[in-house]
Image (tube, helix red, strand yellow):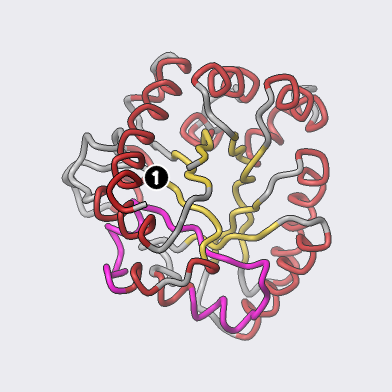
Amino acid sequence: MRYSFNTFNHSTYYGLPPTLPRQIEAAASAGYDHVGLDILSVLAHERDGLSPRDLAARLEHHGLPCHELVSLSISANKASTLRGLEQILRVARVLRPAQVLCVVTGEIDDDVVANTATCVRSLAEEHIGLSLEFLPTRHVDSIPEALRLLDRVAHPGLRLVVESWHFFRGPSTWADLAALPLDRVGFVQFADAPAPMSDDAHHESMHRRVLPGRGVLDLDRFCATLVAKGYDGVVSVELLSESWRTADLHEFADATLASSRSVWESATTRFG
């Protein structure tokens, strides 16, 4: 497996100052293979005078390619979707991510299908894939629902983000995961979770994740199912944790990589 340090836990989304250069340095020091950058922090740095080209130079200096750029919002509103796509394309042409992560707002209707198709074709022209994330808090909440959109768009550049938290906390089943064709998987996002403290799934997802192996999710079976089907791609470690948000970035990068690698290597040894 190859591991990507997902920067969203320290995103400006949470009201934090942008810290992407420090996060890139911490990821490189820990031994990550890639970095996943969030567009909100990239734009915040740009407003402060650190351009996407400057960030690209930092990535090159540390030998860390950008794997995923997060995120592009797609809806039935064509104008809104195209504004987001234009911003993503402008940044992606400099940072050269392998994948752009997208989320869909609303039901899968003809407008959402058309707008998704426009996005995936535009990114494909830049040799960038588009990976759809299903979330239990949205209409596209499961593997089957996400595949329904993929089937309607019918473009090889559109694939799925298989996210462990969303898989376990949403309506997807083990049968869904086992039946998911390998060529439909864009990449994997990975974290563990404790027993929930409330019914607020958004809060639980955004603030209460824990290191892989420290929670209650059956990550051994999750990893084993993906490894058994031949997955050996990128694992983006997305530990969204309020408590880790105030920790030292190097400690955070070291802990997330070590725990993730341990769980995946165990599954690979048994089923790879």
Residue type of the residue flagged with mark 1: Phe
Q: Is residue 133 left or right of residue 245?
A: right
Q: Which residue is mark 1?
A: 190
Range of residues picked out in magenta: 147-175
Whole-percent x, y for residue 268 in the image: 35, 46
Q: Is residue 143 left or right of residue 85?
A: left
Camera sees residue 227: yes
Comparing 61 with 80, the one in front is 61
Above or below: residue 98 compared with residue 22: below
Camera sees residue 197: no
Q: Are there few (<14), some (14-19), or many (20+) residues within 10 Å of tag 1?
A: many
At 83% across and 62% down in the image, what residue appears?
125
At 41% across and 16% down in the image, what residue appears?
251
Q: Secondary structure at mark 1?
A: strand
Whole-percent x, y for residue 263 in the image: 30, 39
Asked if residue 176 lies in the magenta stretch, the reply is no
Q: Is residue 228 left or right of residue 123?
A: left
Comparing 108 with 234, the one in front is 234
Above or below: residue 158 compared with residue 162: below
Whole-percent x, y for residue 104 in the image: 55, 66
Asked if residue 149 lies in the magenta stretch, the reply is yes
Above or below: residue 95 compared with residue 133: above
* Count of numbered circles on the image: 1
Q: Quadrant of residue 58?
A: top right
